[in-house]
């Protein structure tokens, strides 16, 4: 009887698998969507549902499609990544300029089966090895650093790299050190995730984020502040945590988490201090960089602290002198610290926080954990990932940083290189 039931269940599963595959109507919609990547896309009302076009009108679809076509070319062919549904699929597009992109699509089950959902990933260069990615990174204008490494026990085993020991400006990726400090104190029982802290005027900064618009005195838990800091890079949540934890403890974490360029990060700046020092209507930054470390601390606690937040004008530049700095190896070390100290207990929640925003369209079929934090500002771009292989359980760090004050950074190309590096990581 058991054998008969096993055979029946296998037949039912096989029949279900045979049925659950894209319909011929969906295949037609995939071809039409792929055909929109051209010089003169059109006919949107015959392809997309009215509800979709209300959210993404033709006036938005046209420039998006043509820009994608100009940058990466048209679709040569496509293949399924997920073909297990009748009215939805995920496919990989191969583009004529040497890139590929993933397309997720859904169509209505009734009527004309128009497209109700469409998501096109960042284009990825079709590089064949991690070394080719490193070579592409090395040829970007300005200064870059890149590392793919296996986190093997207590060691970091590089698989490919470029300038792995070069200290570069991180942008908001510095918030990893704030998160690591909070992790340490939670593990030590000094703090709890549900501890309540209150937004004060000294912590209200500028975007990114949403907390800058909240009333002073708003109560938030440490978990909420940390999640906002990492997932949407909330600057006000970050400064609130820095003030709560204490500057000196985050500076101690720099050393504990393996940052080998401590002198560049001490004093450890809040985001508001960074804005004020780079404010172009004053010479705060020039004055600051000429001081000793202890003089800098006094300068921050007096002149900078007293300068009104609402008087801060345009702020940028000086990314080689006033910033938060780390090399690719330093980033791998702090990611390893977070992994090592979040395996169990209360610290495990850090992994959930780091995984809220995946950063890029990373393949969930390959990785069962995707942690991400990046950073960007004029002249600065960083993408950093902590990954665990679904097949082997092994952990990897993938990180890239690009600094250049000469011209605007091409974020799309940089993201494509990092995405391809993740795809090529074994």
Image (cartoon, rainbow, N blue to C red):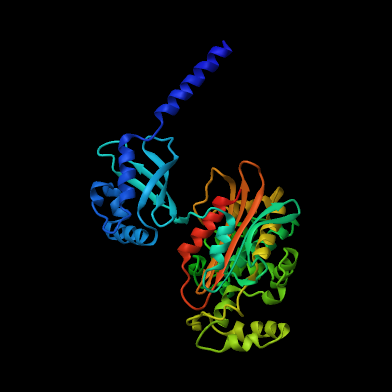
Left or right: 312 with respect to 28?
A: right
Q: Residue 191's quadrant in the figure?
A: bottom right
Q: Residue 380's quadrant in the figure?
A: bottom right
Count of numbered circles on the image:
0
Foreground: 230 or 48? Answer: 48
Foreground: 220 or 293? Answer: 293
Please provide percent x and percent y for residue 169: 60, 72
Q: Is residue 227 visible?
A: no
Q: Please determine whether, in this image, residue 193 is positioned above or below residue 283.
A: above
Please provide percent x and percent y for residue 290: 66, 88
Foreground: 201 or 180? Answer: 180
Q: Is residue 331 visible?
A: yes
Left or right: 17 with respect to 109?
A: right
Left or right: 251 with respect to 364?
A: right
Left or right: 154 with respect to 122?
A: right
What's the residue at 56%, 55% (across, down)? 421
Q: Please determine whether, in this image, residue 82 is positioned above or below residue 37.
A: above
Quarter that holds the N terminus: top right
What's the residue at 66%, 85% (across, down)? 299
Q: Please determine whether, in this image, residue 346 is positioned above or below residue 269.
A: above
């Amino acid at each position: 009887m058991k054998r008969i039931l096993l055979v029946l269940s296998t037949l039912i599963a096989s029949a279900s698998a045979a049925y659950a595959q894209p319909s011929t109507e969906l295949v037609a919609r995939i071809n039409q969507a792929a055909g929109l990547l051209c010089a003169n896309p059109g006919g949107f009302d015959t392809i997309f549902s009215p509800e979709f076009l209300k959210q993404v009108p033709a006036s938005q679809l046209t420039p998006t499609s043509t820009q994608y076509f100009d940058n990466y070319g048209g679709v040569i062919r496509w293949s399924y990544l997920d073909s297990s549904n009748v009215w939805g699929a995920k496919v990989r597009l191969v583009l004529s300029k040497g890139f590929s992109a993933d397309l997720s699509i859904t169509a209505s089950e009734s009527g004309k089966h128009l497209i109700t959902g469409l998501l096109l990933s960042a284009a990825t260069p079709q590089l064949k090895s991690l070394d080719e990615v490193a070579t592409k990174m090395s040829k970007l204008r300005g200064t870059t650093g890149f590392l793919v490494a296996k986190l093997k026990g207590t060691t970091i085993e590089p698989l490919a790299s470029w300038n792995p020991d070069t200290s570069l400006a991180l942008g908001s990726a510095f918030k990893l050190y704030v998160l690591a400090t909070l992790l340490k104190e939670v593990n030590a029982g000094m703090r709890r995730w549900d501890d309540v802290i209150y937004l004060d005027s000294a912590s209200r900064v500028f975007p990114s984020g949403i907390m800058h618009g909240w009333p002073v005195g708003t109560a938030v838990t440490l978990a909420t502040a940390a999640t906002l800091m990492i997932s949407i890079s909330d600057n006000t949540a970050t400064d609130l945590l820095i003030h709560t934890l204490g500057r000196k403890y985050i500076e101690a974490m720099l050393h504990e988490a393996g940052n080998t360029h401590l002198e560049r990060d001490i004093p450890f700046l809040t985001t508001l201090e960074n804005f004020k020092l780079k404010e172009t209507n004053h010479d705060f930054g020039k004055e600051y960089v000429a001081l000793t470390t202890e003089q800098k601390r006094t300068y921050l606690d007096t002149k900078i602290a007293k300068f009104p937040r609402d008087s801060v004008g345009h702020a940028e530049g000086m990314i080689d002198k006033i910033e938060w700095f780390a090399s690719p190896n330093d980033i791998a070390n702090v990611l390893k610290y977070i992994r090592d100290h979040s395996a169990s207990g209360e610290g495990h929640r850090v992994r959930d926080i780091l995984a809220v925003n995946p950063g890029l369209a990373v393949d969930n079929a390959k990785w069962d954990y995707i942690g991400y934090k990046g950073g960007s500002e004029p002249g600065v771009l960083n993408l950093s990932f902590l990954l665990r292989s679904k097949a082997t359980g092994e952990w990897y760090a993938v990180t890239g940083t690009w600094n250049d004050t000469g011209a605007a950074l091409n974020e799309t190309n940089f993201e494509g290189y990092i995405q391809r590096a993740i795809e090529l990581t074994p």
